Amino acid sequence: MKATGIVRRIDDLGRVVIPKEIRRTMRIREGDPLEIYTDSGGEVIFKKYSPMGELSAFASEYADALSGGTKLGVLICDRDHCIAAANVSKKDVLEKAVTAELEEIMENRRTVKPADKRITAVEGFENAICVASPIIAAGDITGAVVLVETIETTEADETAVSLATVAARFLGNQTE
C-alpha cells in the first residue's frame, strides 16, 4: 500500500472526503460504488466496485464465442479496465486501462463503428476498434464490448455490429 500523505477527518455524519487528486488518478467518479474492506491491523481500504468484475469468467467465455463468430478480436471492459479478451494477446490487454476515446464512446451510450480514424480501446494496445457497444445496466454504464481488428479481419460487417450490441445488452442484463 502506498501512503499519500493526505489526512482527512471523519465528519459528524461519518463521512470522509476522498481528495480530488486521488479520485482523478484512480478514475473515481461521482456516484461510483466503492467496496470497503478491513483487516486485523485496523486498516480500512476502499476499492472501486465493478459489477463487470464479478462476471469476468463468464465474460471470457462470451468473448471466445463472439470472436469465433466474427473472426475479430473481442475485448470486454468495465469502465476502467479490460476484464476479458479473445483472439488477441491477453497479456497485452487484460487489466490495462481503457483509453479516453473508449470512455467517450461509453458515455455516448451508442454502439459505434468508427470509420474515420484509428481509435484504440486499451492503453498501449494498437489494434483499432471496429465496433464498440456500451454495456448499460439499470441505466448506468458498466463497460463495453469492443471488437478489434486482427490479422484475419480488419473490418466489422453489420452482423458483427449486431452481435456486439446483443452481447452488450446481454452482459448488462447479467449485472442487474
Image: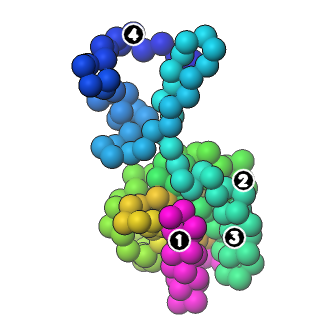
Tell me if label 4 and label 1 are in contact, CB under 8 Å. Answer: no
Residue under the point 61% across and 19% down: 39
Is residue 124 visible to the viewer in this orientation of the structure?
no
Quickly name the residue at label 1: 173
The amino acid on which the numbered mark 3 sits, given as a three-letter code, is Tyr
Q: Quadrant of residue 30?
A: top left
Quickly name the residue at label 2: 90
**Marks 2 and 3, how far apart in space?**
15 Å
In the rendered image, the vertical position of residue 172 relative to residue 19, given as above or below: below
Q: Quadrant of residue 127?
A: bottom right
Q: Position of residue 88 (x, y in %)?
A: 71, 61
Question: Residue 21 lies in magenta, yes or no?
Answer: no
SS state under label 4: loop
Q: Position of residue 18 (x, y in %)?
A: 33, 26
**Marks 1 and 2, how far apart in space?**
25 Å
**Marks 4 and 2, how far apart in space?**
36 Å
The amino acid on which the numbered mark 4 sits, given as a three-letter code, is Gly
Tell me the magenta residue range: 153-176
**Marks 4 and 1, how far apart in space?**
41 Å
* Mark 4 or mark 1, earlier in chain: 4
Q: Would you call the spot at circle 4 few (<14 residues within 10 Å), some (14-19), or many (20 or more)?
A: few
**Which mark is nearer the camera, 2 or 3?**
3
Is residue 72 visible to the viewer in this orientation of the structure?
yes
Residue 168 appears left or right of 39: left
* Mark 3 or mark 1, earlier in chain: 3
Q: Position of residue 115 (x, y in %)?
A: 42, 77
Q: Which mark is residue 5?
A: 4
